Amino acid sequence: MNSVISKEVEVLKLGRIKFKNAWERQEEKFNSIIDTKIYNRKTKNQKKTKNYILTCSHPHVYTLGKSGNEKNLLIDDKEIERRNLEYYKINRGGDITYHGPGQLVIYPIIDLENFFTDIHKYLRYLEESIILTLKEYNIESGRVEGLTGVWINHKKNNPKKICALGVKTSRWVTMHGLAFNICPELKYFKNIIPCGIENKDVTSLEKELNKKVSLEEVENKVIVNLSKVFDFKIL
């Protein structure tokens, strides 16, 4: 456990950025935290580990988690190239998902030893931040038993996913995160079996409200709600 705790989080708003470039930024921050932790284990001169939250959106891209099934991508390489899409196999948990314009992507790169060492709790806290944000728009949402993410109609037989989660942790440092559908083109989800879950619809905040929503406005609300749930100070 860390002997020096830091509950300060630096927020980096990356805007629209290619998935590969954002992945490299994540790796850079992730490795810097790991390096500090390794240093701390070798010396009595303890340093605080830094915490980051990266926010962004991506051009059209599909990503497959390390435990995912490639059969859940319903189009082939030629079709991906023809439509000018991207596809990556990555090192997070979970199955396949889509990222694109109009979707808020949040990557917390944090040292959980500054907060708590419980991956299940971490995922529930990420979900809670989105549930609280949706409540600000008078939308009731929640969890579906046995599934990650945030769902609309979660108490009914036809839940619709509005936010997907997929994370990686090493030495209690996190990577990857959540994808919150604000106003994406939902047709791109038809090219996959989202998160490997069949017969479940996907929705967006704009579709549920039936009006335009500012992605930047939602971004700021989610950051504030993350700070409330995790009890951190925003830098």
Image: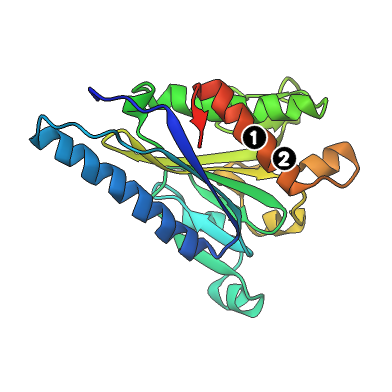
- Measured as percent of width and height from the top left, residue 69 is found at 47, 52
Asked which quadrant contains residue 28, the reply is bottom left
Q: Residue at x 9, y 34 (%)?
A: 43
Mark 1 = which residue?
Answer: 222
Residue type marked 2: Val
Q: CA distance from mark 1 to mark 2?
A: 6 Å
| Callout 1 crowding tier (Cα within 10 Å): few <14, some 14–19, many ≥20 | many
Q: From the viewer's perspective, is 151 left or right of 7?
A: right
Does the CB distance between marks 1 and 2 fall below 8 Å? yes
For the residue pair 51 and 128, the one nearer the viewer reads as 51
In the image, 174 versus 6, the foreground residue is: 6
Observer-nearest of 151 and 217: 217
Image location of residue 193, percent across then percent down? 61, 50
The residue under the point 57% across, 63% down is 17
Q: Position of residue 200 (x, y in %)?
A: 69, 39
Please tell me in which quadrant of the rendered image residue 49 appears.
top left
Residue 162 visible here = no
Does the image show residue 145? yes
Instruction: Give the quadrant of the N terminus.
Output: top left
Question: Of all residues shown, which one is farthest toward the right?
Answer: 210
Question: Which residue bears the numbered disc 2?
Answer: 218
The residue lying at 55 percent from left, 22 percent from top is: 229
Tell me if residue 173 comes above or below residue 23 in the rendering. above
**Element type at marker 2?**
helix
Direction from residue 68 to residue 198 in the image, left or right: right
In the rendered structure, which amino acid carries the disc numbered 1? Answer: Val
Residue 47: x, y in percent? Answer: 23, 34
